Image (tube, grey):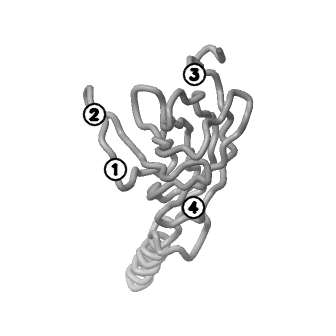
Amino acid sequence: MRHLAVPATVIAGALALAACGGSGSGSGSGSGDAKADLSVSSSYMPQPVSDMAAGFLTIANEGGAKDELTSVTSDAAGSVTVHRTVGQSMEEVTSLDVPAHGRLVFKSGGNHLMFENLKRKPKQGEKVTVELHFADSGPIKVEMPVKSATYNPANGH
């Protein structure tokens, strides 16, 4: 009987090790949990008062792998740059992480988009189309509504 106990232990150990190579391996094969699953909400642009404007939104990632926002484009502006706020100063960055099972938030006083050299000043009630580009996921087009220059998303005014 003792001879059967050793093979059973070896088989159980092999099965446990095989289970470790599942979707968490990051190989891309297996279940969809090893990929980013991105969506965008709460986007808006305060009505610009010059040839520059800010943009805010939230990128949610329901997937099991992180991704990175690498660039943003829009026909409304000569360029769109990504900024983060550190302390009291803002700095342009080449990318920002969208964590697995997390969110990347762009809000006043924090991370934000800068639309530079606007081709025209969009007015409240209009929409500006932007395209978000990522390191791994495909691009996402967003229709960003233009709100009043003093819009506060916390109270909707």
Calculate the distance from the C-alpha at mark 4 to the C-alpha at mark 2.
32 Å
Which is in the foreground here, disc 3 or disc 2?
Answer: 3
| Tag 4 residue | 33
Pointers 3 and 2 in contact (C-beta within 8 Å)? no
Q: Nearer the viewer, mark 3 or mark 4?
A: 3
Q: Earlier in the sequence, mark 3 or mark 2?
A: 2
The residue indicated by pointer 3 is 149
User: Which is nearer the N-term, disc 4 or disc 1?
Assistant: 4
The residue carrying mark 2 is 86
Residue visible at 66% across and 17% down in the picture: 156
| Residue 133, image x, y percentages | 53, 60
Q: Nearer the viewer, mark 1 or mark 3?
A: 3
**Residue 21 vertical placement versus 65 (above, below):** below
From mark 3 to mark 4, how far is it between C-alphas?
40 Å
Residue 154 lies in quadrant: top right
Quick one: quadrant of the N terminus?
Answer: bottom left
The first of marks 1 and 3 along the sequence is 1
- The secondary element bearing badge 4 is classed as helix
Residue situated in front as seen by the camera: 137 or 117:
117
Q: Nearer the viewer, mark 4 or mark 2?
A: 2
Q: CA distance from mark 4 to mark 1?
A: 28 Å
Alpha-carbon distance for marks 3 and 2? Answer: 23 Å
Give the quarter of the image for residue 68.
Answer: bottom left
Q: Residues within 10 Å of mark 2 (few under 14, many from 20)?
A: few
Q: Are marks 1 and 3 in contact (CB under 8 Å)?
A: no
The residue lying at 30 percent from left, 41 percent from top is: 91
Q: Amino acid at mark 4?
A: Asp
Kindly tell me whether residue 66 is visible in this rendering: no
- Structural distance between the alpha carbons of marks 1 and 3: 25 Å
What is the distance, in whole Å, between disc 1 and disc 2 at their CAs?
11 Å
Q: Secondary structure at mark 2?
A: strand
